[in-house]
Structure formats: structure tokens, C-alpha cells
Image (tube, helix red, strand yellow):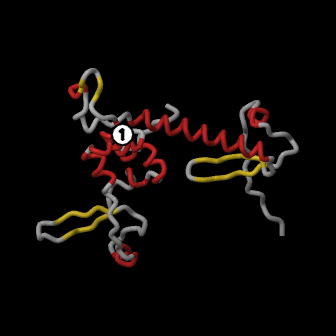
Amino acid sequence: MKQKNNSQAIILPDGACEKAGFTERDTLEICADNGVFVLYKENMTALELANTIDSLSTLASELIVDLAAACGTCDNCGENEYDNMICGRCKGSPVQWVSECDLCNSLLNERQDVHIPEHILGEAGIPPCSKLKAYVDEAGEIVVKESEIQQGICDIPEGVLSVLKASGVCLAELDDLIVSNSIIYGM
């Protein structure tokens, strides 16, 4: 039985293979992960592996700078604007403001671990991986429903979120960009 080849061709810009140091003899591997494909040599020397790591680290740094720039720095929801200037210097810093900002902290503390069994979600017509929202109805009972918004700051990988927080990035703006599904890269 002959199997059909379902592979697709990838067209690279002129000079990309040369810039990456790929030759016709190299076999390439592909890593596919959340929003990215990475092509790299199947066999690498220690120096080639170190250079690959450096290239990926540089790219990651550039991307996190782009994300941080789209969010801006925390100003503790407007409470640390220029009115807190003492001798030409602001009280604290954006990093301190993030740690003191009620909105940023409430966003970080929204992760509640309430487990609803899949069979109950199924009875309610809610897919098992859906984000939920809860509220108290008129009778004083807690009602859990599928949220209209299925993404937010809680979906940011923990390592990325900790770098952004430690850099003083406005987490409220980050959440707004995620919820609104705004394009912030490649505009």
C-alpha cells in the first residue's frame, strides 16, 4: 500500500540558509510549539549548539521587550504620575508600583482553583477546558457559567509573567491586550 506524503514545502527568504549556516548536507529538525516553528541542525557541535542557544535567547529577549513596550510601565493606576516627584525623582519605581498596585495584584490573584467535574460541565453544555465565571444570584446562590472571555493574564506562562512583573510592566494593560485579542507585533 502506497502512502500519500502530506508534507508541505517551506519557502525561506533568499540567503536565510546561508545566514543560519545551513548547508545542503545538513539535515534539519523542526520544533513546533505554541505559536512558533524553529528549524535547526539535526547534528551540531558544541559551538553551534551554544550559538543556537544564543540566537534563541536574543530572539526571546527582543520579543519580551516588544510585549513590555506594548503594555507600558505600571504607574500604580495613575497614583505615581509626576505628582510624586521629590527632588526630581519619583517615589519608588515601576517594579515597586506593580507590587503595590491594587489592580495588578487583583489580576495576579484571580487564579482560583475551583474544580467542577467534567460530567457536571457536560450536563451544563460547557466544554471541559472552558474558562468559567461565578456570581451570586438574587437567591444568594453561587452560579457558575462559561465565561464569554476565554483568555486573560492567567494564560501567560509563569516565567514570562514573572519577568514582566519584575520589569515593572503594567499588568492591567497586558490583561486588556490579551482580552481584546489586540495585534501588538508585526503591525
Is 155 situated left or right of 88 in this image?
right
Is 89 situated left or right of 166 in this image?
left
Residue nearest the viewer, comparing 133 with 169:
169
Q: Where is residue 159 in the image (x, y as percent from the top left)?
A: 48, 51
Residue behind mark 1: 95
Residue nearest the viewer, comparing 117 with 174:
174
Q: Position of residue 128 (x, y in %)?
A: 42, 69
Query: Residue pushed farthest right?
Result: 25
Query: Residue pushed farthest bottom?
Result: 119
Query: Residue pushed farthest left?
Result: 139
Q: Position of residue 36 (x, y in %)?
A: 60, 47
Query: Residue pushed farthest top?
Result: 88
Q: Position of residue 40 (x, y in %)?
A: 73, 46
Q: Is mark 1 on a helix, strand or loop?
A: helix
Pointer 1 local density, CA inside 10 Å: few below 14, some 14–19, many at least 20:
many
Is 39 situated left or right of 22 in this image?
left
Give me the residue at 22% from left, 35% from top. 79
Is 114 situated left or right of 142 in this image?
right
Give me the residue at 24% from left, 46% from top. 102
- Picture quarter containing residue 176? top left
- Picture quarter containing residue 98? top left
